[in-house]
Amino acid sequence: MNPLLGDRRATLILIGPALLIYSVVMLVPIIVSFGYTLTSGNAITGFTFSGLENYQRLVTDTRVRDALLLTVRYAVLMTVLQVGFGYLLSLMYVFVLRKWSSAVRTLVFFPVVLPTVAVALLFQQMFAIAPQNGLVNTALEAVGLSSVDWFGDGGTAFLVIIVMDVWRSMGFYGVLLYAGLLDIPEEVFESARIDGASGLGLVRRIVLPLSLPVLISSLIFSVNGTLKVFDSILALTNGGPGTSTSPLTIYMFDTSFRFGQYGYGSTVAFLLTVVSLLVTVFIFRANRRDLTKD
Amino acid sequence: MTSVDTTVPATTAPRRTPGPGPRRRRSTRVRVGQVVSGALVALLLVIVVGPLVWMLLGSFKTQTEFLEQPVWALPAQWNLDNYVFAWTQGNFAQYASNSVLTVFPSLLLVLLFGSMAGFALEVLVWKGRGAILITFLAGIMVPTQMILLPLFAAYFRLGLTGTLWPLLITYTATSLPLAVFLMATFFRAVPREIFEAATLDGAGLIRSFFLVGLPMVRNALFTVGLVQFFMLWNDLLIALTFTNSGSLRTLQVGLLNFTGQFGSVQYGPLFAAICLNVVAILVIYLFLNKQVQKGLTAGAVKG
């Protein structure tokens, strides 16, 4: 214990403002939101207690099932693709571009900081079919294929969402994993090469195991973020056509603000929270078990 | 990424094998490898930069050009008509001012309160600081959706609906957890002795925070500020929830509603609006890209 750095009054003054704001604007609402799940109504009409009705509705609601499936499908696919492409980028930075990678890294990272809405509107135009073909359909026709109405069908619209979000995020994971690769000492590569490892063998037997920790934290970060996907889908397809690309977040937003059902909206938000927590805990534990095995 | 296995051994393997045969094969392999990896890098750059260039070109085209010329055609004129239209008719001046008025005051509060709390949690010694730190950490995990409805109800009852206050308050609170956590990790690197010495010299702990602590972590403050700036500036969820009238819209909400404002889609102004939205970010990124990359990825690993 250090008496010099222990002072109750100073502690209170320093931590007070942050803790107060955090408690009032985040912690209390989380608890209130949980309370909402037991009610029906909204802020304007008032709330009435409805017991477990919202939870009963949650388990039978086919739209919730679809939204949950879409959320999971998006999170799994995006995580595999963005971490995968990011890893390939990082390998390229380290082994192919080497000292010249800085400019490429900077360029590929740029979409990460762009406003999602701007990128989504841009991709809407790129994949447009009416009133005129966008870049993608023009390219398809140039190679003899026919134009596709990308946003007219849930499947192709989902594909555009994935393409756009990989475009936006791969540079981020590229830099994240690149930093991880730089931490591997050069001597490890040297000795592996002397032992005859090269090319893919070197990557598989030396690079991959050594970058596993940073890969795992990328996975956790990615799953956590992608489960909460909202901006990109809302701005690109608004969940449509119909509700075919609506994840839980958009369904929650619709129920709450379009239909004014705060109770049920909170229940959907609660489901989302539980799913994120479960998945994160699961990855953490799976990861820990692996480490003890090694 | 097949280029990896051709170039890595080619440039580093010892060239001991004698005779012209193998050597010639190796040098052609080197060349093929370089061509393949060069092509891959070029493709990558086209994929990343292509859409952005197309966006910029589109912002100069007229409506007729959009409807009648091929998508890859260059604009016939280089004037700023579309930009002027977006800025004035499209209300972008108002949206930009709303964004600035909410994001920057929040940033200031987050940095001040976040670094104070980070200092208290990492440097000061008191009971329960571990639990408080974990409480802040939990805030990073919980989806924002979980707090929107109670906040909406509270702002409504307090009569704050229809002002920018809900945005400012919510931005400050949702940014605090990450800021507190990052600042705490940055204070970890500062030797304790410095603060002990300052206290022995008679400075109170609060004075030594402002006069000794803050200046020592000013780079960290800058990094955290940059990270939070991008998160808040690009926010859509919170802004969409709390901006119920057109005059409160931030840049992102304004851009999202841009096409709906006019009867038909005005393509030139739309592209110009997208460019306007991007330009502030681009300028910051041009000057600070190293810090941005480092800061954003640090937020990921530690968060």
Image (spheres, rainbow, N blue to C red):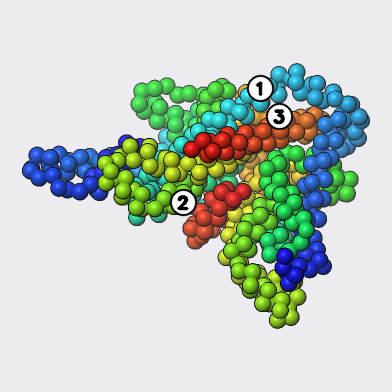
Estimate the x, y position of residue A27 in percent, counting from the top left. Answer: 79, 46
Q: What element carries label 2?
A: helix
Sequence-earlier tag: 2 or 1: 1
Mark identifier at residue A251: 3
Estimate the x, y position of residue B54 in percent, counting from the top left. Answer: 45, 43
Specify the subunit that label 3 lies on. A
What's under tag 1, amino acid-wise? Asp
Mark identifier at residue A66: 1
What's under tag 3, amino acid-wise? Tyr
Estimate the x, y position of residue A209 in percent, counting from the top left. Answer: 43, 40
**Figure check: B67 above or below B113:** above
Disc 1 crowd, CA 10 A, few/some/many (<14, 14-19, 20+): some
Tell me what residue is drawn at x 75 percent, y 75 percent: B204
Sequence-earlier tag: 3 or 1: 1
Residue that numbered label 2 is attached to: A179
Estimate the x, y position of residue A221 in percent, counting from the top left. Answer: 58, 42
Mark identifier at residue B119: none
**Figure check: B256 above or below A242:** below
Sequence-earlier tag: 2 or 3: 2
